[in-house]
Every structure is written in C-alpha cells, then in structure tokens.
Amino acid sequence: MNTVTEKVKTYGYDGDADLPRSLVDAVQTLSEDLLSIPAEYREDAEIDFEPGFEYGESYARVRITYERPETPEETAERLAGERGHWEGQLNQARSRVDYCLAQIDGLGEGRA
C-alpha cells in the first residue's frame, strides 16, 4: 500500500510560523500539533530538525509530519500519472526506433 506524507506544520526558516522561545509554550504548541493529527496516525508522527540554508547562512527549521494511506482517488491519480509517463517514454522510444530504421534504410540505397 502506498502512503502519503502529510505536513502538519513547519516552524522556523521558510516555515508556517516560528516556535515560541519559551520551552513550556513550545511544548504546548507541539502538543497541539500532535492532537491535530488523526488519532490513528499519531503514534508514527515524526518531527524533523533540518537546517535551511540561504546566502551561506544556516537557519533552524522544524517540520512535523505523518503518513497515511493513499485514498482511492490519490491512487488513481498517481497511476494515471505513471501510465502517462511510461506511455510518453514508449512513444519517444518508438520515434527513435523509426528514426534509426530510416537511417538504416537510407544506407541501403548507397547513401554515404
């Protein structure tokens, strides 16, 4: 089964908001984020501490995410996208084969 990563919130650099500087307030904010996640996905929710970089400077960033199963609509959309991608690849390959065959046929006519 495929899953979708849902972003709950990003704090800090290039994020939705800044975490409060007070530890008590930060823990309260993160607790509220956890409670905003559907109960069946809370146990596997993740927090990532990753820096953001700009102009040689490093900035703190905290991201809260969880994974959930794809909905049938998301599965259909993903499969349609994959099918379109591979059909495009196949069409390009067929065009390349046709081009190569034409080049070979041209060599048979004594063309240099």
Image (cartoon, rainbow, N blue to C red):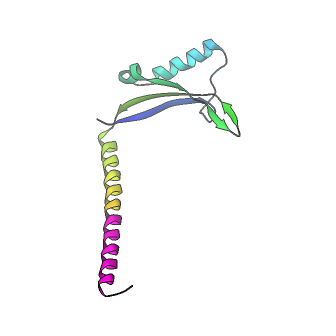
Q: Residue at 39% across / 85% down in the picture?
A: 112
Compared to residue 6, the image places residue 36 above or below, namely above
Q: Residue 11: say if magenta.
A: no
Displayed quadrant of residue 74: top left
Q: Residue at 30% across / 67% down in the picture?
A: 94
Q: Residue at 31% across / 43% down in the picture?
A: 75
User: Which quarter shows the N terminus?
Assistant: top left
Compared to residue 90, the image places residue 36 above or below, namely above
Q: State the residue lying farthest toward the top.
A: 24
Q: Is residue 27 left or right of residue 68?
A: right
Residue in the foreground of this view, choosing between 45 and 37: 45
In the rendered picture of this protein, how many numbered marks are placed on residues?
0
Q: Residue 110: say if magenta.
A: yes
Q: Main secondary structure of the magenta part?
A: helix
The residue range painted magenta reads: 91-112
Displayed quadrant of residue 105: bottom left
Residue in the foreground of this view, choosing between 87 and 13: 87
Compared to residue 72, the image places residue 12 above or below, namely above
Residue in the foreground of this view, choosing between 11 and 90: 90
Compared to residue 104, the image places residue 88 above or below, namely above
Q: Residue at 33% across / 73% down in the picture?
A: 100
Query: In the rendering, at what x and y percent does residue 47 appear?
Result: 50, 24
Query: In the rendering, at what x and y percent does residue 43 appear?
Result: 39, 19
Query: In the rendering, at what x and y percent does residue 67 appear?
Result: 39, 30
Query: In the rendering, at what x and y percent does residue 36 appear?
Result: 46, 24
